[in-house]
């Protein structure tokens, strides 16, 4: 792999002005993106012997068709909208009154109103609703596939709905594996969506960085990013991972009304479902000022920077997940307890397959596989001493190519913390 010029990332922040642009006129062939994604799902269905899928995760519905509707609402109200797809038919069951939203999608052959099989919709009649739903789904899938005991992949259904499909005579399997394997490899046209989401998110992070000042609360600062994302037609921010000062260590303390103090570190993980529904996922840590960062703050930052870039340097197509774990940066003992739970992970429309584990975690949590061209990955680091005052979160998003990797996230690192 050709060595990347990491110093080019550390450009002056004035260079971020070029990122402040609209992503609406993006020159992306969205029909080609949708066709590629739907073909990927159908190919994986064949590989895993799945005759039909019932997708209820709104992210997967969007992946397979492009149709978007109330993603956060749909995630917690399943199945309020769902997609039945076979090798040659795609029928979207849309939320009540929303059938018109899928008009014009060549990936959707038919739209029907959904029958919500959930307790909030059916109340004490839930069991009867689920049985009726299961019988109707079984009849439809038999009609579409010609298989009496078709194998159907399902996800995110309540337990009663799954039991109803079994009772109706279908062979029910988990749809996660074929769908995740489909999503793992991006097309060149799909990568344009990823990059558009990253550039818009980098604009939002630049605005957040410019807004940093002592006296703000964490949530006030975090809201700057959120506003910028929505204003650029992004979807939502999946987490609230911004914290300052002592709340940076350990990691995973969500943004709160806590006040940001002078000379605090401020750690951010974007976790943005942005333009075109694609995840922009990178992490940065800033310094509030007005004084220069302390030696301890710089040490934390430099160690996290070293971990991310060492692990980026070893990535290559054809590498196994086990080999990656064996060659990944060795976390010093004093930082090990508070390590980030992953070394790297796949990313597309959300965080996705594969998970790449640290060497020490691989025996218990890891699984093997192969890095392939077209995979997009986020390389992670959190560095903080157990019981220490502060911590640093850094992360980069990359594309695995035929020869190595391509850096996707371009937001600069902090010179005053590196020098």
Image: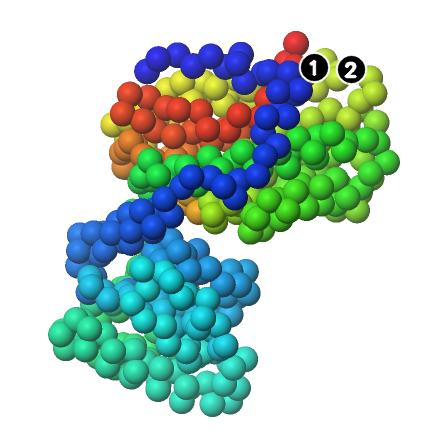
Q: In which image quadrant can residue 149 be found? A: bottom left
Q: Quadrant of residue 84?
A: bottom left
Which of the numbered marks, if any, corresponds to residue 416? 1
Vertical arrangement, residue 185 with respect to residue 14, above or below:
below
Badge 2 is on which residue?
Answer: 292
Instruction: From the viewer's perspective, tell me whether residue 357 is left or right of residue 213.
Output: left
Instruction: Return the residue nearer the eye: 186 or 52.
Output: 186
Residue placed most toward the observer, 362 or 280: 280
**What's the CA distance linking mark 1 and mark 2?**
7 Å
Residue name at image x 78 percent, y 15 percent: 292
**For the residues bearing labels 1 and 2, Cβ distance under 8 angstroms:** yes
Residue 77: x %, y % from top left: 51, 70
The outermost residue toward the right is 215
Residue 57 in the image: x percent, y percent?
Answer: 42, 61
Residue 322 image offset from top left, x and y in percent: 31, 30
Residue 337, numbered circle: none
* 1 or 2: tag closer to the N-terminus: 2
For this orientation, the residue located farthest to the top is 419
Q: Quadrant of the C terminus?
A: top right
Please name the residue shown 43% across and 14% down the image: 4
Image vertical order of residue 120 relative to residue 308, above or below: below
């Amino acid at each position: 792999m050709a060595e990347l010029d990491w110093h080019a990332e550390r450009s002056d922040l004035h260079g971020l002005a070029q990122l402040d642009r609209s992503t609406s006129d993006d020159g992306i062939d969205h029909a080609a993106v949708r066709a590629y994604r739907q073909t990927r799902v159908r190919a994986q269905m064949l590989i895993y012997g799945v005759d039909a899928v019932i997708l209820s995760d709104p992210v997967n519905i969007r992946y397979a068709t492009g149709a978007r509707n109330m993603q956060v609402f749909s995630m917690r109200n399943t199945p309020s909208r769902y997609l039945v797809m076979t090798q040659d038919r795609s029928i979207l069951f849309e939320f009540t009154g929303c059938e018109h939203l899928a008009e014009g999608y060549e990936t959707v052959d038919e739209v029907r109103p959904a029958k919500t099989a959930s307790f909030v919709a059916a109340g004490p009649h839930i069991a009867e609703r689920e049985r009726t739903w299961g019988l109707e789904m079984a009849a439809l899938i038999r009609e579409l596939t010609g298989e009496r005991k078709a194998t159907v992949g399902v996800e995110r259904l309540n337990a009663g709905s799954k039991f109803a499909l079994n009772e109706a005579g279908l062979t029910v399997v988990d749809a996660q594996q074929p769908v995740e394997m489909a999503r793992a490899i991006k097309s060149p046209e799909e990568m344009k969506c990823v990059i558009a989401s990253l550039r818009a998110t980098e604009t939002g992070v630049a605005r957040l960085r410019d807004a940093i000042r002592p006296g703000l609360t964490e949530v006030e600062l975090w809201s700057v990013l959120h506003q910028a994302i929505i204003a650029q037609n992004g979807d939502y921010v999946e987490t609230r991972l911004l914290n300052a000062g002592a709340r940076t260590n350990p990691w995973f303390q969500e943004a709160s009304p806590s006040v940001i103090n002078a000379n605090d570190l401020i750690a951010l993980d974007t976790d943005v479902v942005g333009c075109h529904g694609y995840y922009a996922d990178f992490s940065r840590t800033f310094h509030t000022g007005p004084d220069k960062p302390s030696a301890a703050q710089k040490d934390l930052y430099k160690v996290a920077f070293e971990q991310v870039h060492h692990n980026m340097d070893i990535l290559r197509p054809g590498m196994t997940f086990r080999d990656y774990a064996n060659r990944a940066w060795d976390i010093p003992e004093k930082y090990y307890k508070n390590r980030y739970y992953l070394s790297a992970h796949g990313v597309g429309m959300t965080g996705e397959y594969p998970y790449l584990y640290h060497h020490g975690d691989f025996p218990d949590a890891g699984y093997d596989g192969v890095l392939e061209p077209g995979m997009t990955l986020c390389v992670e680091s959190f560095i903080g001493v157990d019981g220490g005052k502060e911590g640093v979160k850094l992360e980069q998003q990359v594309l695995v190519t035929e020869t190595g990797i391509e850096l996707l996230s371009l937001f600069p690192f902090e010179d005053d913390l590196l020098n």
